[in-house]
Image (tube, helix red, strand yellow):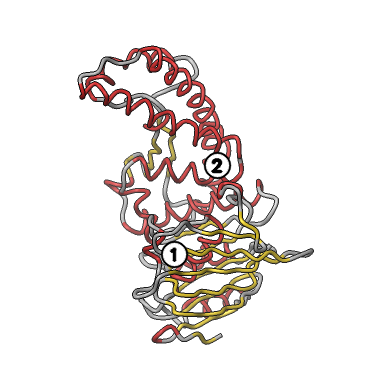
Amino acid sequence: MHLSKLSLLNFKNYEQVDLSFKKGLNCILGDNGEGKTTILDAIYVLSFCKSYFNAIDSHSIRFGEDYFMVQGCFSNKNDEDEITCTVRKGRKKVFKRNKADYDKLSDHIGRYPVVMITPYDSNLILGGSEIRRKFIDSILSQVDKAYLSNLVAYYKVLEQRNALLKSVDYGKSINMELLNLYDDQLIHHGKLIWQTRKNFIESQLIPRFRIMHEALSEGKEEVLLVYESQISDTIYESKFKSSLDKDRATQYTNVGIHKDDLAFIIEGHSIKKFGSQGQQKTYLLALKLAYYEYMLEEMDVEPILMLDDVFDKLDRHRVMALLKLVTNKADGQVFLTDTSANRVPEILTELGKSSNDITIKEGGAIEA
């Protein structure tokens, strides 16, 4: 599978643009602020039904306009699918596959998988645990529909349980029968989610992460990735039940998989506190490439890999190692943006590789 065509209308800084892409490496070159990242974000929209950067859909509408439309054609050996996303101010988002609406947007997730790597991924290290949980959930939700179903159910019940705990504020006594019902549901869904996360992180993600990090750093740094959770098969239920007094005091559910986290370690220390910018960048690249390798093996279609402005803080050896990794992806499709017109082409020449280059000029003009 690969994205052959992309059309944008009133999407972010683009009034209208039509692009064609090829299999293999597609390099989008141009100065900062000209719209390179916007193109990658539009591709992300076609895969995940939402922007990678904007939580509110209407924030992606071009200034002064009332709507945006992103349309793309995904091609494989047998056929071509046309995907269209339209967002209008004050109206429900419309998402179509071959001009037919989806009953649920979740039915689309995983059909055209992409893996995005951007400077904003630094939030995985610098941000709170919620960001790291969402990272794991975004991977597993694409390949495991049962996991996605359990996740949706868990957070729905969690919201209901927290609302019940907050009702004490209004002089109401807690309905213990209803609370016990919520508890049973959270424990049931939570155990399934925890087991899936644990198996994935320990047996799938960590081994791939170590291989990728060694390739990028030439084995110069010792790194660890640790899944941290309050629960396990044996203590989850008892720990959850014993937290009721604290839950009532804080009016919040304090125990569960919604508190899980990942610990990022380099040379025995937290990479957030002790890692240099270059080390953090390498760590994140290895983590995202491990994600890509997992998707590559698990999905029926080959994921699209997108790297946005990833070379900052990397020395030339690591840049070359990265390009060597991403250009060895058989029939896969890779998108890469860079502000330098020469850096990637020169290294690709050294590696004996080629790319489809698209240059974005001032004002968003496209030169292929």
Q: Residues within 10 Å of mark 2 (few under 14, many from 20)?
A: many
Residue 190 visible in rendering: yes
**Distance CA(mark 2)–CA(mark 1):** 30 Å
Q: How many marks?
A: 2
Which residue is at a point 30% across and 49% down the rendered structure image?
126
Which residue is at a point 59% across and 61% down the rendered structure image?
304
Residue 321 visible in rendering: no
In the rendered structure, the answer to whether residue 251 lies left or right of residue 146 reads left
* Residue 297 rendering spot, x and y as whole percentages: 66, 48
Mark nearest the camera among 2 and 1 is 1
Rendered position, 215 above or below 188: below
Residue at numbered disc 2:
140
In the rendered structure, the answer to whether residue 326 lies left or right of residue 338 reads right
Q: Residue 88 has which mark?
A: 1
Q: Amino acid at mark 1?
A: Arg
Rendered position, 9 above or below 310: below
Which residue is at a point 36% across and 41% down the rendered structure image?
130
The residue closer to the viewer here, 132 or 20, is 20
* Residue 94 rendering spot, x and y as whole percentages: 53, 59
Q: Are marks 2 and 1 in contact (CB under 8 Å)?
A: no
Rendered position, 126 above or below 169: below
Q: Of the two numbered discs 2 and 1 on the same chain, state the one appearing first in sequence.
A: 1
| Quadrant where the image shows the C terminus | bottom right
